[in-house]
Amino acid sequence: MEFYKNLYAGESLKEKWESVVEKLEMGKVQFSCYLIVLPNNPVNQLECYDSILLLQKRWIEKPALVVGVASSYTESLEVIKKITEDTYLRYGDADLRRYILETQQEFQESKV
């Protein structure tokens, strides 16, 4: 699992998202935790999954970029709304995939 450099977090996880990420990286199950991911399928913009699903072999072999965490499906929709608003402010459209990939690339280039 790879995590977005500006990981979005739902309100209920604002204070503990780092702990959630750390546990997920160690392969520990996180109950009541939804992950918003940039799917490997280039047609879809974002997908939302219960974090337990991302510990399956399929996701370990083809890891997804996690762009947000939330404590419920409803909260994950609020996080997606925030990502969409940020995308619109930057580009004037709702191309979430482009926004995420370009900001991630900018971060990686700034580290070099």
Image (tube, rainbow, N blue to C red):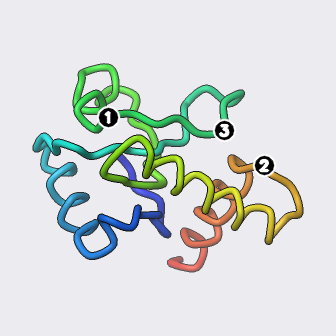
The numbered disc on residue 45 is 3
Relative to residue 49, is residue 68 depicted above or below?
Answer: below
Q: Amino acid at mark 1?
A: Asp
Distance from Cα at disc 3 to Cα at disc 2: 8 Å
Q: Report the disc number at residue 95.
A: 2
Above or below, comparing residue 80 to residue 5 in the picture: above
Counting every numbered tag in the picture gives 3
Which numbered disc, 1 or 2, marks the residue closer to the eye?
A: 1
Badge 3: how crowded within 10 Å, few (<14), some, or many (20+)?
Answer: some
Of callouts 1 and 2, the N-terminal one = 1
Q: Residues within 10 Å of mark 1 (few under 14, many from 20)?
A: some
Residue at (64, 66) in percent of width and height: 103
Residue at the spot 39% in from the left edge and 33% down from the top edge: 49
- Which mark identifies residue 50? 1
Q: Amino acid at mark 3?
A: Gln
At mark 2, the secondary structure is: loop
